[in-house]
Image (cartoon, rainbow, N blue to C red):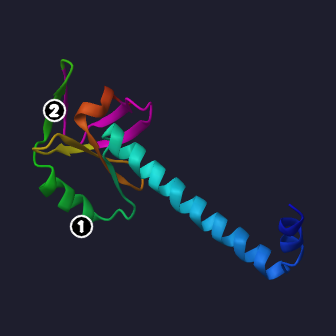
Amino acid sequence: MERMIEGFASLGWQQYLFAASVAYVVTYIYRVYARWKERKKNGEKTYVIKTLDRQAVDRCKELFPIDRITFRGKEFTRGMKIKVTTIQKNVIEGEFIGLNQVNLVCIKTGNQIIAHQLEKIEEIVAAE
């Protein structure tokens, strides 16, 4: 035990700083991996496009060609303002762009375009 204490006492501040840095990086990598694994386990697929311009919206209309959706008896058409609540209790409010063949719903918010799985949506209502 004394040899261990003597060994730690002989270390300089550079070695302690290096050890702390390595521990931080390893912890960060582990947490990113754990979050990725959790998302994959839940099957959550939400895609966000940060830059919003006219060309991006036109491209989304091509990628999401179905312009009408019926969800629990209510019908929504392209251009309608909608409010979507996901099963993770996230609320997305914006304009309905469309639906594609793999059941991704595309919504244009103020500065983002969001595509979310239809199966992971709890509620869709018309927004005011």
**Residue type indicated by callout 2:** Ile
Q: Quadrant of residue 54?
A: bottom left
- Is residue 31 shown in magenta? no
**Nearer-the-camera pick, 111 or 30:** 30
Q: Which mark is first along the chain, 1 or 2?
A: 1
Real-space Cα separation, disc 2 to disc 1, in angstroms: 23 Å
Magenta segment boundaries in residue numbering: 74-95
Where in the figure is residue 74, as x and y percent of width and height? 21, 21
Q: Secondary structure at mark 1?
A: helix
Vertically, is 101 above or below 3?
above
Which label belongs to residue 84? Answer: none
Residue at horizontal 59%, vertical 59%?
27
Where in the figure is residue 34, as x and y percent of width and height? 47, 50
**Nearer-the-camera pick, 123 or 12:** 12
In the image, is 28 to the left or to the right of 13? left
Q: Crowdedness of circle 1 by 10 Å Cα count: few (<14), some, many (20+)?
A: few
- Name the residue that disc number 1 marks: 55
